[in-house]
Amino acid sequence: MRNSLQRLVELPDDIGRLVCERAAEDGAGPSLALVSKKVQSWVNPIIYRKIELSSSNTPLLCRTFQDESGRKGPAFFATHVKTLVVAFILSIPPELLALIKACRAVETFVIWSTVYTPEDVQELFARSSLTPTRLAINAIEFAPEQRHLSYPILRSVTHLDVVWNHDDHWTWDSLIHLSNLTHLSFDIRSENGAMVRPYYKRMAGELDDIKAIFEGEVDLRAVVAYLGTLKESPGWQPDYVNLLRVHEDVLRDWGEIRDGEDFWAEAEQTVQKRRRRLTARHSPHQNILQ
């Protein structure tokens, strides 16, 4: 290993940089960053292209962001962070809020923090200059007057996922003004989640509204998905569900760790199958056969 690193350092900069960047793309960035400051400057933009913040690594990243003597201050985060996932963090302290708002080039932004204050919502969604194209938000803690889709952060969004409680009243009038929106997902939570499994099984024959969406009768583009965990009931399959994904799948999807198709692609496949069936049903050849 030492000999390989020595040969790497001896390469011309243009070739060495290309090799290092390719290796960093494959996951070797943290190791390469230890070789030298020059190599570190090559691979850091790739290492920090995707940041997943959790309660364990947030303090260190915030210190890195605030260190004026380092090379990874606000300007670095503003330029290089493209995917930002904030998950499993109970609150948003001021230093974390500053880090998030600095990531102005972010393209995919996921914020699943458990607790917001009304001021957090305003700072993140109304006053920040973030313009992601993919956005997933936990809106369960939004105050009643904040349950709408008029926030500036949404102006460039093409893929939007909103987690909200089924009892909360939302204002949807602004949805029509999201001109770039092509994909929309509602993750509707129930306070009594334990009732979902027996409810689906017991009432499957009576859920005509869900069945109609599942079969594409309401809108060819509307897809029913189950996002949760099946570990407690191996082999359990809810009725009238087009897509079935566990929590780990969703985390990989939004973290842009592709292990096959993401849930957007699977939904698109369902829509395409419906369209092919509809085309076949109305084709002249089909009518002749009938």
Image: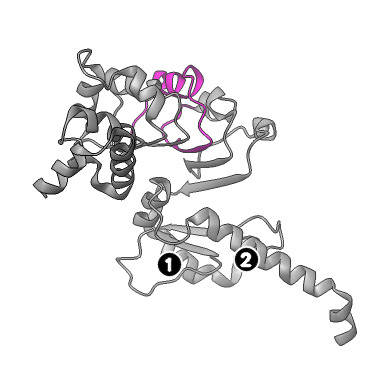
Report which quarter residue 18 is drawn in: top left
Q: Can residue 290 be seen by looking at this rendering?
A: no
Q: How is the image coloured?
A: one colour
x and y, in percent, of residue 167 in the image: 50, 42
Work out which residue is located at the far left of the displayed protein and give it. 2
- The range drawn in magenta is 114-143
* 197 relative to 288 in the view: left or right: left
How many numbered marks, from 0 up? 2
Residue to which mark 1 is pinned:
198
Residue 159, quarter of the rendered image: top right
Neighbor class of circle 1 (other Cα within 10 Å; few <14, some 14-19, many 20+) is: few
Amino acid at dot 2:
Lys
Q: Residue 119's image quarter?
A: top left
Q: CA distance from mark 1 to mark 2?
A: 17 Å
Determine whether 168 is above or below 233 in the image: above
Residue type highlighted by circle 1: Pro
Give left or right: position of 75 versus 206: left
Q: Closer to the observer: label 1 or label 2?
A: 2
Question: Which element type, helix, strand or loop, lies under badge 2?
Answer: helix
Which sits earlier in the primary sequence, circle 1 or circle 2?
1
**Which residue appears at 40% of the width and 24% of the height?**
79
Above or below, 246 relative to 113: below
Q: Nearer the viewer, residue 158 or 124?
A: 158
Residue on which the image places disc 2: 211
How crowded pointer 2 is (Cα within 10 Å; few <14, some 14-19, many 20+) is rated as some
Q: Is residue 1 magenta?
A: no
Q: Position of residue 254 (x, y in %)?
A: 42, 46
- Residue 270, image x, y percentages: 61, 64
Q: Locate residue 160, reporting x and y percent.
A: 54, 41
Secondary structure of residue under mark 1:
helix
Q: Examine the rendering and report whether any part of residue 238 can be seen.
A: yes
